[in-house]
Image (tube, rainbow, N blue to C red):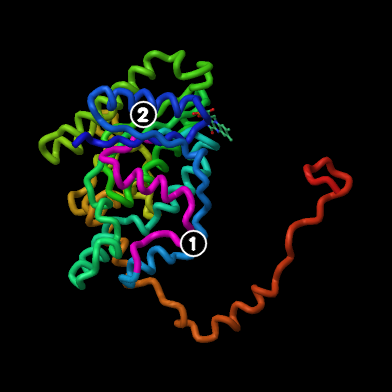
Amino acid sequence: MAKKVLGISFGRRMSNCDIMVKQALMECQEAGCEVAFLRADDLNISNCTGCIACVIQIMMGKGRGYCVRHDDFDILDECVMQSDAVILACPTYETSVTGRFKTICDRIGPSHDITFRKAAYEEGKAAGKPESELPDVRCFKKRTAALISVGGAMTENWIALTMPMMYEFTFPMGIDVIDTVEYYGAMAHESVLGNPEMMDRMKKVGQNILASLNAETEEERIRWRGEEEGVCPVCHTRLLQVSHDGRTVDCVVCGSHGTAEITDGKIKVHFTKEEMDRSRLRWGGKLEHSTEIKTQAQPSGTIKNLKELKAPYAAFNPGAFEPEADAFGNIKK
Ligand SMILES: Cc1cc2nc3c(=O)[nH]c(=O)nc-3n(C[C@H](O)[C@H](O)[C@H](O)COP(=O)(O)O)c2cc1C
């Protein structure tokens, strides 16, 4: 059966992200893959309200982990479930991903975490439930991804947070990122079509996805194919956070923890195997987090007089400032 590759663009219609994803998809289609393309802005997907019904269902074994809201997220979810690989391109807005990208990641959220879903699936299966009442088994399929961030600015640090944030789409479902491209300075071309080097790189993205899909071993399937190794050996990104002790560092993207030092003039991190296995990109790190939610999140009713304690805050509603009549604000009086 032909492998399925899903491309999602979070950019403007027929602008850089659309064209870049399509170029990579065309490469996959030419090699015999079945491809699908979604534009995030064509989907009507509302924000996560934080009701946590999706996670509660999974934890109680009473549902499939779906959002109580049914909107176009269901279209995206079905496409992801069918896919063997995803190629995402997101513009940089204010140094980071777009609001819609974040909205979609929040909707993927903990409910799609494979450790949550696997536990619910296995418990439900053991209890004799039919597949139709269990978390979607397709969630556990091994998938690979390529991530592309795009920014207009000529200075690379203006796109610094976009790529790290893009991993929010892939890590809950354990999708293995095998290639990333950070395209900055996009404004120097009317369209990426005026940048043949970048268009060639998109063909390479498609080829890298194909190589992963055709791999015969798991090691080869997840092999990193990006142009740079990056700093973190687990996720290959370059965003480190210095710990409060001032001596150790965390990889902001995947949560690996250890030390950093300069060797031969280069900043290198030392993450032990145990720490790397606690990365949220790996089963151990994910399981640690879903277990802490299962065991440490307090149920409602533990603070007996909570309603009373909340009362002054519920009654405190100063509202918005009145528009200033003598200022040239945007609100018409
Ligand atoms: C609200 C907004 C904020 C932006 N902020 C940044 C930014 O911080 N850094 C940057 O490099 N480009 C920024 N840009 C430019 C876009 O990243 C750029 O136009 C990109 O090509 C958009 O992707 P698209 O062409 O696929 O639509 C911003 C654009 C908008 C609309």
**SS at badge 2:** strand
Identified at 84% across, 50% down, the residue is 324
Question: Circle 2 is placed at which residue position?
Answer: 181
Is 104 placed above or below 124 here? Answer: above
**Residue furthest out toward the left:** 216
Query: Which quarter of the rendering shows the N terminus?
Result: top left
**Residue furthest out toward the right:** 326
Q: How far across and down, in percent of the image, does residue 164 sit? A: 39, 41
Q: In this orientation, does residue 293 appear?
A: no
The amino acid sitting under disc 2 is Val
Disc number for residue 50: 1
Front-most of 198 and 312? 198
**Is ligand 1 closer than 8 angstroms to the Cβ of mark 1?**
no
Identified at 83% across, 45% down, the residue is 332
**SS at badge 1:** loop
Identified at 30% across, 52% down, the residue is 280
Q: CA distance from mark 2 to mark 1?
A: 32 Å
Q: How far across and down, in percent of the image, does residue 40 sit? A: 47, 39
Is 120 placed above or below 232 here? Answer: below
Q: Earlier in the sequence, mark 2 or mark 1?
A: 1
| Residue 127 figure quarter | bottom left
Identified at 15% across, 35% down, the residue is 220
Q: Nearer the viewer, mark 2 or mark 1?
A: 1
Highlighted magenta segment, given as a residue range: 63-88
Front-most of 11 and 238? 11
